[in-house]
Image (tube, rainbow, N blue to C red):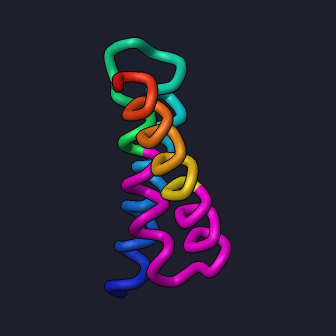
């Protein structure tokens, strides 16, 4: 039962995140990442995708730091 609730919540976050990518009043990217983080507990594909997102985030952060100096 706990797993079903966790997955349902994760998919709702992902759907809200997708809506947020279209609508300007909902923060889409954080909701997508949150949904992926919850799904990554049980789903290997979500864990891989979350790892890829973390790598891209680190690259973007390094690029911003280097351009600020």
Residue depicted at 44% across the width and 24% down the height: 67
Which quadrant would residue 18 be assigned to in this image? top right
| 58 or 48: nearer the viewer | 58
On the rendered image, what quadrant is the N terminus found in? bottom left
| 16 or 69: nearer the viewer | 69
Which quadrant would residue 8 be assigned to in this image? bottom left
Instruction: Please state if 60 lies on the left or on the right of 38 as rendered.
Output: right
- The answer to whether residue 47 is magenta is yes
How many dots with numbers?
A: 0
- Magenta stretch: give its range: 32-52
Compared to 24, does 69 lie above or below?
A: below
Q: Which SS does the magenta portion mostly show?
A: helix
Q: Residue furthest top?
A: 24
**Residue 40, how many percent across, how many down?**
50, 74
Instruction: Please state if 48 lies on the left or on the right of 13 as rendered.
Output: right
Instruction: Please state if 8 lies on the left or on the right of 18 as rendered.
Output: left
**Residue 58, how many percent across, how many down?**
46, 50
Compared to 42, does 24 lie above or below?
A: above
- The answer to whether residue 18 is magenta is no
**Residue 61, how many percent across, how many down?**
42, 40
Residue depicted at 40% across the width and 49% down the height: 13
Compared to 33, does 16 lie above or below?
A: above
| 41 or 66: nearer the viewer | 66
Residue depicted at 45% across the width and 15% down the height: 23
């Amino acid at each position: 039962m706990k797993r079903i609730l966790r997955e349902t919540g994760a998919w709702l976050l992902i759907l809200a995140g997708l809506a947020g990518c279209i609508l300007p009043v909902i923060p889409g990217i954080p909701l997508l990442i949150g949904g992926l983080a919850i799904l990554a507990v049980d789903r290997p594909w979500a864990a891989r995708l979350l790892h890829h997102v973390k790598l891209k985030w680190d690259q973007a952060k390094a690029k911003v730091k280097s351009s600020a100096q």
